[in-house]
Image (cartoon, rainbow, N blue to C red):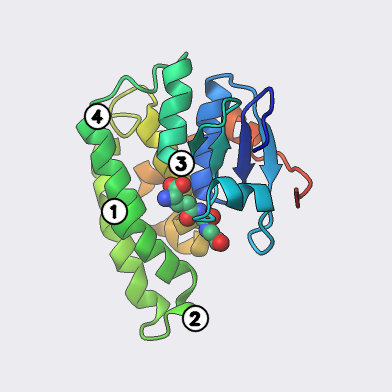
Amino acid sequence: MTFSEVPILYSYRRCPYAMRARMALYVAKIPVEIREISLRNKPAHMLQVSPKGTVPVLVLPNGHIIEQSIDIMLWALQQHDPEAWLDVDVTQLEHWVVLNDGPFKLALDRYKYPERYPENTQDHYRPQGESYLQSLQHMLQQHHFVLGNQPSIVDVAIFPFVRQFAAVDAGWFAASPYQKVAAWLSYWVDSELFAQVMQKYPTYLG
Ligand SMILES: N[C@@H](CCC(=O)N[C@@H](CS)C(=O)NCC(=O)O)C(=O)O
């Protein structure tokens, strides 16, 4: 077991799960050693502490392992939550994360990589994700952020996935009826916070 002074975050820059973990750690001002991995050549230490082999994985100095992105967000914000991102109804958080990480992620993968799911065309997969965009649009018509007029853990947990969906066909998204979603997405993508967590690191091979 490797012990270190600061937590180690095994991460992958473009992974939406890793993005949300990095954003919570950054906002909570928790210094971490970011180890940018190659998904094709994962470091032995990462697999030793977390054999499931997905990122993000947070290794605490006491050896404790947190291996789900939402749990990393919650852990970080429970240490320090200067933006009050945890000031939400837990059932609402669960609702959005279950929807996002479940059916929406499934639709996103099919829409993004239709060649991997040749039983249907891309045009067939897009509406499966659109029902989620409709739900988001409905919330964002009522307030600036998903649960209210202040940003919360919910916004940060889900926007990296919506970003990927929007990017599959940017022209379609720009002309779509989901303009509140588009404005909300731009707020996050253009934020200083997002720029900070998208810094590039050399690949850590272990
Ligand atoms: N439920 C996990 C999902 C993490 C996940 O699936 N990460 C992807 C990258 S975006 C991964 O590491 N996949 C393993 C691989 O591609 O080998 C979490 O929330 O942390």
Q: Residue furthest front?
A: 1
Is the shortest distance between ligand 1 and the CB of mark 3 under 8 Å? yes
Q: Earlier in the sequence, mark 2 or mark 3?
A: 3
Q: Name the residue at 39% across, 23% down.
A: 85
Q: Which residue is mark 3?
A: 69
On the rendered image, what quadrant is the N terminus found in?
top right
* Relative image position of residue 194 (x, y in whole percent): 58, 35
Q: Which residue is mark 4?
A: 90
Which callout, 4 or 1, points to the residue nearer the camera? Answer: 4
Secondary structure beneath disc 3? helix
Q: Which residue is mark 2?
A: 115
Query: How far is disc 3 from disc 4 in space, using C-alphas?
Result: 16 Å
Residue 184 quadrant? top left
Which callout, 1 or 2, points to the residue nearer the camera? Answer: 2
Q: Residue furthest left?
A: 91
Q: Is residue 179 above or below residue 194?
A: below
Q: Is residue 128 left or right of residue 121?
A: left
Residue 140 quadrant? top left
* Residue 95 shows in the view: yes
Q: Is residue 29 left or right of residue 146?
A: right
Query: How far is disc 2 from disc 3 in space, using C-alphas?
Result: 28 Å
Query: How far is disc 2 from disc 4 in space, using C-alphas?
Result: 37 Å
Q: Is residue 62 above or below residue 35?
A: above
Q: Earlier in the sequence, mark 2 or mark 4?
A: 4
- Could you say which is closer to the camera, residue 164 or residue 184? 164
Q: Earlier in the sequence, mark 3 or mark 4?
A: 3
Would you call the spot at circle 1 few (<14 residues within 10 Å), some (14-19), or many (20 or more)?
Answer: some
* Kind of residue at disc 1: Tyr
Q: Which residue is mark 1?
A: 132
* Relative image position of residue 114 (x, y in whole percent): 46, 77
Would you call the spot at circle 3 few (<14 residues within 10 Å), some (14-19), or many (20 or more)?
Answer: many
